[in-house]
């Protein structure tokens, strides 16, 4: 952003990198328009494919297949929330900084705000809604979060739980310090951190005991 | 029982799991931006990249050309709405699109609306503007600030607390201390983003928005839209963290509602994390001067506290804090004053423990410094100056357990193992420091209403427009109803966060548990009175003819003093009723008579301090160990212990979580958080969650919370003092004092980061 040391003229100009760059570097939002300066000379991308034109995308989420039409710039997070109405996955920053949007892609934790939905085609996505049957028993991690009061407002919780399930699976839940370290990509502003550590331990043991 | 669910002691309720826990761990709890709305359009704000100037032109042409754009609201498009009113549930009086003038960084310049979020984003990036840029004033020390007194310019501070002749007492004191303290700008940053979803149905408007004040929002937005508040419904079923940021409405709400009406589409506008830093309130930076005089025996004889607080040009928000610090100890003579420093920044607002956090940091650091000057143990220095009467008006405290808190926390912490000399404790490369400080928070209670229904089968419904911001109010209000109506918590269904329900106060000032539970208690008593009266009059039942005042309702059975009993279902049958529904209006002592009427109009009336016969506060004592690397000056907090006395604890689980979260907020404020401002252009530099530092899991180690039993029947019928904000008061000073003990370096400016220690060592 330009500095404005004194009185004078300035132009509002929101510098963003082109979305392909963004996707490659992870340096900015996955879903952005091109910078204003680029857009002035290029109304539509030259490659011949207009990303705005809805294209059919097949997403496999929680074991169900969904065919939807999406703007190619749609993030996986927005596709889940706005198109599949799976709103358990939360948006906290849209920049991969808070972890609230954590889902599993092929069983591994991933930030859904940092992926385009089209990139998720052919992959198995699991969201918080897919962790346990709607009316049945909770997943041991969900139950542990309840037992250990590992949340207050609950907003970061789906992301915390998805991360925590992966954390155990990765073998990063062997001791408290490991759990703290490998759960540090998920911010909790209510600061339930000690209870989250307790919950991960409880669930780890419950999962092992089967 | 576990650390998360402590065993209840006297006057403490069971650690019932949160009634909404399942919804929260399955993703089924609906936050405002999760609510399904048909035919939704997406709104996105465009904000200024200067902090002061005039807008010459805003070029919307390119943005309008983006396929999928429905329309754009900018200057000249908002004549139908009024600007907000500061203090009327709105954090600022600034109507950002009403005049082409920029008052602060990131001010709203347009709202772009499109069929998809992606189109709205593309269009928003294509909005350009041309300004006449003026040099802004960025911070408390910048040239161009306007300084005014809080007294006479704000509603809140009518007089500065004072007693005796401070100047004379300070001059005569054998030991004196004087220093300046500073606290920074901070942003709440709840993980849930700010958002507004506006849906019109004919002349009726529904707003889904994260709110700590749905009735306040309703009346404020109705006023801006020049419509009858009864035609507006505000819903906020779950709030993803507020911490004060969602207490007052922002100018966005009415703009989104207007756009939805103009464009004939429901609109959802989710504010980006970056825009959240500039389009809502924040914690004002402060500069404070503390002067203290004492006798050699440790008795304080003079205390003065003066503050200068950052504010906007357009409003006079006051942090205050002197109302609390001047009542903390038996000081002798007291003087105080607050000034507002008006700059080119947006208006600040309430952030968790708004006045107490900055002002108690100064006081409790000063206490530690004075104790050292006197050669006293900091705990004993507080004991010498403990008082059961506040020193300004001489009112007795309704209850005050400062020293029991110190004793319990000191024991759990192992304070006796501390070598009092600075830089005396070390473990290899790590300097060890131990510090302590007092926590204090005023006990607030406000007028409130609720509707409670008891069915013959023991099911209960509680309805009240309070807000579930993570405090656990759904759970504790359900517990209160279950307990009073002799049923299980599982049988209670509770509805909150909707202006179709009876109004409750703003969820701020730690008043909700006290106010809502007192109201639910009242409604339950009305239900029992109605049921008992009908039962004793009904013929042919064992309770016929009994004194209704002697009946009780326990475990689904109505009981008489002589042992006669009747199951609840039979009692309802005898009374000829299927259910009893009671609406209660709770008007606590020391609120105006028309407080409930005002509540319906969106205005919360808290009990007024000067109308109370007693001083009412919750207290605590916090002990911290810091470890500071001797080479790098990296600062770590391996453990923190807090002991608190806050009257009746409704639920030891939810209370423990709030106090624990508060302590961690205190660590965060002491060591991490500061919104950095570029002096040259008055713009925020670190406006995202990567650059705005707050603790992650790895930053937090052992956090121990002790809840002392305390009974206080003066505060309110529920006996609750409120503790959502107590935990993070005092922590800053406890850490600053521990850092001094470890290093011999006294940092009086928050946050305490290693660069400050390096610069001073």
Image (cartoon, coloured by chain):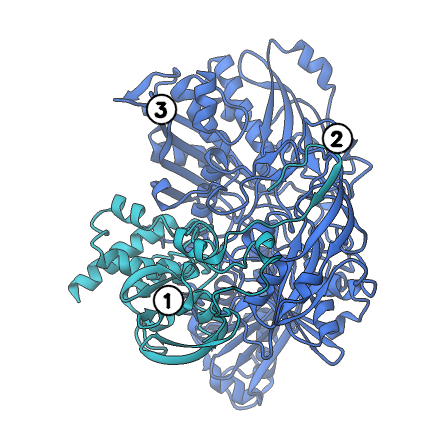
Chain colours: A cyan, B blue
Q: Mark 1 sits on what residue?
A: A119
Front-most of residues B680 and B256: B680
Residue B76 is left or right of residue B115, and the answer is right
Q: Which mark is residue B176?
A: none
Helix, strand or loop status at disc 2: loop
Give the percent coordinates (x, y) of residue B664: 44, 42
Image position of B370 (left or right of B198) = left
Is the C terminus of chain B in the top left, top right, bottom left or bottom right quadrant? top left
* Residues tagged 2 and 3 counted as in contact (Cβ below 8 A): no
Q: Give the labeled residue for mark 3.
A: B632
Q: Chain of mark 3?
A: B
Q: Which mark is residue B145?
A: 2
Alpha carbons under labels 2 and 3: distance apart: 37 Å
Residue neighbourhood size for the residue with mark 1, other residues' Cα within 10 Å, grouped as few (<14), some (14–19), many (≥20): few
Local packing at callout 2 (Cα closer than 10 Å; few below 14, some 14-19, many 20+) is: many
Q: Is residue B24 left or right of residue B221?
A: left
């Amino acid at each position: 952003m330009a500095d404005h040391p004194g009185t004078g003229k300035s132009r509002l100009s929101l510098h963003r990198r082109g979305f392909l760059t963004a996707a490659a570097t992870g340096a900015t939002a996955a879903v952005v328009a091109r910078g204003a300066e680029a857009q002035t000379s290029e109304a539509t991308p030259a490659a011949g494919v207009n990303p705005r034109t809805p294209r059919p995308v097949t997403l496999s989420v929680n074991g169900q297949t969904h065919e939807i039409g999406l703007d190619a710039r749609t993030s996986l997070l927005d596709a889940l929330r706005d198109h599949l109405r799976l709103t358990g996955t939360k948006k906290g920053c849209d920049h991969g900084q808070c972890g609230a949007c954590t889902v599993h892609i092929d069983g591994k934790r991933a930030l859904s705000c940092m992926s385009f939905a089209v990139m998720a085609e052919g992959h198995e996505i699991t969201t918080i809604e897919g962790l346990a049957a709607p009316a049945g028993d909770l997943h041991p991690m969900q139950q542990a979060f309840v037992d250990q009061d590992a949340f207050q407002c609950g907003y970061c919780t789906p992301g915390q739980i998805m991360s925590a399930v992966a954390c155990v699976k990765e073998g990063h839940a062997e001791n408290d310090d490991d759990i703290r370290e490998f759960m540090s990509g998920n911010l909790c502003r209510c600061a339930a951190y000690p209870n989250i550590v307790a919950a991960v331990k409880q669930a780890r043991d419950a999962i092992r005991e089967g | 029982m576990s650390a998360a669910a402590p065993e209840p002691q006297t006057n403490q309720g069971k650690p019932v799991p949160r009634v909404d826990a399942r919804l929260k761990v399955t993703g089924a709890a609906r936050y405002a931006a999760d609510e399904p709305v048909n035919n939704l359009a997406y709104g996105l704000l465009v904000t200024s990249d200067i902090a002061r100037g005039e807008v010459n032109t805003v070029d919307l042409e390119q943005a309008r050309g983006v396929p999928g754009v429905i329309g754009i609201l900018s200057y000249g498009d908002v004549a139908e709405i009024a600007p907000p009113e500061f203090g009327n549930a709105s954090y600022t009086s600034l109507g950002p699109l009403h005049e082409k003038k920029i008052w602060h960084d990131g001010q709203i310049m347009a709202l772009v609306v499109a069929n998809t979020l992606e189109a709205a984003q593309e269009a928003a990036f294509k909005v350009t503007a041309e300004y006449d840029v003026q040099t802004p004033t960025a911070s408390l020390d910048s040239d161009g600030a306007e300084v005014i007194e809080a007294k006479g310019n704000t509603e809140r501070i009518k007089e500065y607390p004072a007693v005796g002749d401070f100047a004379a007492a300070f001059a005569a004191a054998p030991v004196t201390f004087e220093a300046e303290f500073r606290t920074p700008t901070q942003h709440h940053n709840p993980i849930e983003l700010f958002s507004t979803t506006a849906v019109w149905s004919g002349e009726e408007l529904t707003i889904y928005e994260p709110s700590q004040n749905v009735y306040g929002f309703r009346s404020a937005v109705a006023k801006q839209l020049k419509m009858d508040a009864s035609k507006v419904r505000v819903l906020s079923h779950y709030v993803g963290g507020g911490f004060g940021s969602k207490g007052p409405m922002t100018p966005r709400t009415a703009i989104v509602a207007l756009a939805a009406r103009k464009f004939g589409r429901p609109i959802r506008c989710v504010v980006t994390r970056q825009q959240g830093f500039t389009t809502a309130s924040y914690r004002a930076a402060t500069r404070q001067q503390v002067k203290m005089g004492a006798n050699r025996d440790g008795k304080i004889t003079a205390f003065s506290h003066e503050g200068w607080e950052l504010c906007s040009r357009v409003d006079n928000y006051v942090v205050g804090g002197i109302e609390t610090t001047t009542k903390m100890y038996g000081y002798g003579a007291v003087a105080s004053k607050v000034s507002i420093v008006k700059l080119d920044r947006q208006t600040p607002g309430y952030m968790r423990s708004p006045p107490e956090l900055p002002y108690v940091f100064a006081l409790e650091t000063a206490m530690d410094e004075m104790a050292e000057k006197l050669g006293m143990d900091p705990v004993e220095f507080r004991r010498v100056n403990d008082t059961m009467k506040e020193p300004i008006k001489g009112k007795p405290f309704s209850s005050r357990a400062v020293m029991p808190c110190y004793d319990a926390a000191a024991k759990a912490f192992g304070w006796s193992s501390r070598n009092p000399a600075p830089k005396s404790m070390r473990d290899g490369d790590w300097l060890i420091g131990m510090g302590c400080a007092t926590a204090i928070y005023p006990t607030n209670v406000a007028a409130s209403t609720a509707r409670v229904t008891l069915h013959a089968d023991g099911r209960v419904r509680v309805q009240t427009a309070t807000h579930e911001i993570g405090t656990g109010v759904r759970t504790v209000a359900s517990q209160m109803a279950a307990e009073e109506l002799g049923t299980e918590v599982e049988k209670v269904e509770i509805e909150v966060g909707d202006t179709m329900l009876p109004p409750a106060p703003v969820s701020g000032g730690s008043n909700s548990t006290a106010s809502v539970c007192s109201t639910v208690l009242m409604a339950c008593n009305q239900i029992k009175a109605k049921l008992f009266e009908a039962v004793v009059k009904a013929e042919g039942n064992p309770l016929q003819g009994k004194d209704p005042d002697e009946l009780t309702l326990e475990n689904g059975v109505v009981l008489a003093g002589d042992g006669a009993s009747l199951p609840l279902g039979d009692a309802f049958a005898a009374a000829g009723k299927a259910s009893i529904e009671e609406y209660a209006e709770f008007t606590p002592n020391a609120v105006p008579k028309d407080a409930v009427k005002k509540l319906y109009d969106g205005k919360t009336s808290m009990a007024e301090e000067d109308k109370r016969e007693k001083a009412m506060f919750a207290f605590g004592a916090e002990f911290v160990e810091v470890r500071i690397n001797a080479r790098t000056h990296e600062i770590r907090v391996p453990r923190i212990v807090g002991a608190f006395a806050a009257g009746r604890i409704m639920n030891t689980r939810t209370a423990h979580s709030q106090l624990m979260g508060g302590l961690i907020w205190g660590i965060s404020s002491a060591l991490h958080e500061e919104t950095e401002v570029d002096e040259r252009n008055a713009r925020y530099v670190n406006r995202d969650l990567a650059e705005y530092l707050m603790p992650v899991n790895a930053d937090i180690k052992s956090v121990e919370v002790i809840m002392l039993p305390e009974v206080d029947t003066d505060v309110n019928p529920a006996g609750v003092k409120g503790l959502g904000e107590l935990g993070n008061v005092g922590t800053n000073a406890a850490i600053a004092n521990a850092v001094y003990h470890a290093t011999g370096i006294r940092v009086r400016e928050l946050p305490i980061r290693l660069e400050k220690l390096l610069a001073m060592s």
